[in-house]
Image (cartoon, rainbow, N blue to C red):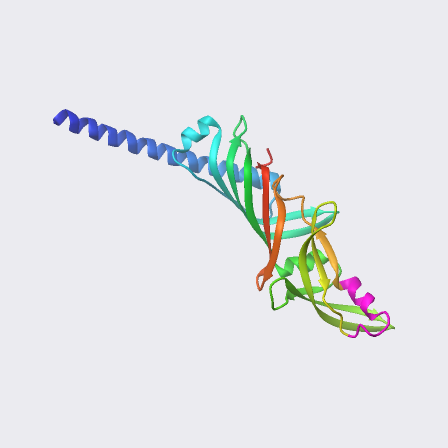
Amino acid sequence: MRFLRVVVIIGVVLGGLFVGVDRWAVGYAENRLADRVQSRQGLAGSAEVEIHGFPFLTQALSHDLEQVDLKLTGVDATADGRKTRLSELEAEFHEVKLNGDYSGGTAKRAQGTALITYEDLTKASQNGVVLTYGGAPNKVKVTATVDFLGKSVTRSVVSTVALVDSGSGKVVRVRADSVPGEGIPGIESAVRKRTDFDRRIDDGLPAGLKLSALTSDDSGVHLTLSGTDVSLAGS
């Protein structure tokens, strides 16, 4: 009995040491991977990584991770020379195959969400308009001042924000449902030149992660992302 008790104690101690080493290793890997992502993405904000599954060490040795969660803040997505700031981006990477030097990997599949605030959407419009919540899902209020017949005219319109296929990829499209005073010749086209716009969001997202859906609420425009063979940390 004494021998068995000693064996049990030794087993518990060794097990505790293994768990401790494993948790230290996963913490170290998460921090290194977060630094790698932040460097590759050129983030103005931060990157947080969580690696799932236990034990981590056996996953690392086989270069296969069950799931990696990534949270980014301050992501600058650029398309056609125009920058759009994503306030937050959260993604789950499943069945990640690590590369040889553990600096990154490729996920068999991934999904996530991203948020564009109205402040950042206003900046992305690049035409001097102000965007706020439109009071219903997929609606935004757009306020613009235009010069018409020698006078400055300010109009606010309720617009639909949607994700559409442009032929070269998905774009975020903002279109006014109607324009006040549109019966006046020329006023509608003058207002729509300011209020209606498209923005592609591609460069800045993890390679392979694409836009798949969109909605909006009072906090901003929410994007749904998904993809296969998605790159993690720019590998």
Check the image and report above or below for 172 versus 91: below
Query: Does residue 25 appear left or right of residue 107 in this picture?
Result: left
Measuring from the top left, give residue 192's x and y in whole percent. Answer: 78, 64
Q: Work out whether residue 109 or residue 72 is closer to the camera in this orientation and state it.
A: 109
Question: Is residue 64 rendered magenta in the image?
Answer: no
Res. 139 image quadrant: bottom right
Measuring from the top left, give residue 1's x and y in whole percent. Answer: 12, 27
Measuring from the top left, give residue 234's x and y in whole percent. Answer: 60, 36
Query: Does residue 175 appear left or right of residue 223 in this picture?
Result: right
Q: Which residues are magenta?
A: 181-194
Query: Does residue 148 appear left or right of residue 144 in this picture?
Result: right
Res. 229 image quadrant: top right
Q: Residue at x 25, y 29 (%)?
A: 11
Question: Is residue 186 rendered magenta in the image?
Answer: yes
User: What is the total number of numbered labels drawn onto the structure image?
Assistant: 0
Q: Work out whether residue 4 or residue 173 is closer to the camera in this orientation and state it.
A: 173
